[in-house]
Image: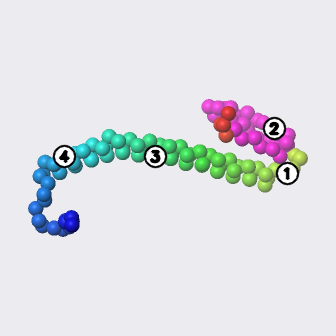
Amino acid sequence: MPKYKSILSTEPDDEPVSNIEQKIAYFDNFIHQRLQPDLDAACERRDGVFKEIAEYTQLRQNVAVLRARQPAGRPLETRADLGMDFYVTAVVDDCEKIVVDIGLG
């Protein structure tokens, strides 16, 4: 029957110190060379998903406000961003349908 050693045991270890130090170095290297880059990449992907969710949540709120404030059949006057904070006045005749490009092709 195998003998299990308690963490609190005061008996001397069977393994030499150099072998334990090699294992510590191996796992330390594994953590820093393999696991840390994988964790960093996963965190970047997670942050990208959170950013995208925030954008769609804001879009949903904007659409809800637009539908609540804009009477049916009346044109909507708004400002459209052309990029680089350059805005133009836009008139939308029919706000019943809203098209959203979600980037699927």
Among numbered discs 2 and 1, the one appearing first in the sequence: 1
Q: Nearer the viewer, residue 81 or 40?
A: 40
Q: Is residue 34 visible?
A: yes
Q: Amino acid at mark 3?
A: Cys
Q: Nearer the viewer, mark 3 or mark 2?
A: 3
Mark 4 surroundings within 10 Å by alpha-carbon count, few (fewer than 14), some (14 through 19), many (20 or more): few
The location of residue 36, given as percent across then percent down, is: 36, 44
**Counting residues from the N terminus, which is met first, the one under dot 3 or under dot 2?**
3
Residue drawn at the location 85% of the way across and 51% of the way down: 71
Which mark is in front, 3 or 1?
3
The tag on residue 43 is 3
State the residue at coordinates (68%, 47%).
59
Q: Which residue is mark 4?
A: 22
Measure the alpha-carbon separation of dots 2 and 1: 14 Å
Nearer the observer, 81 or 52:
52
98 within the magenta span: yes
Image: magenta residue range: 75-101
C-alpha gap between disc 4 and disc 2: 71 Å
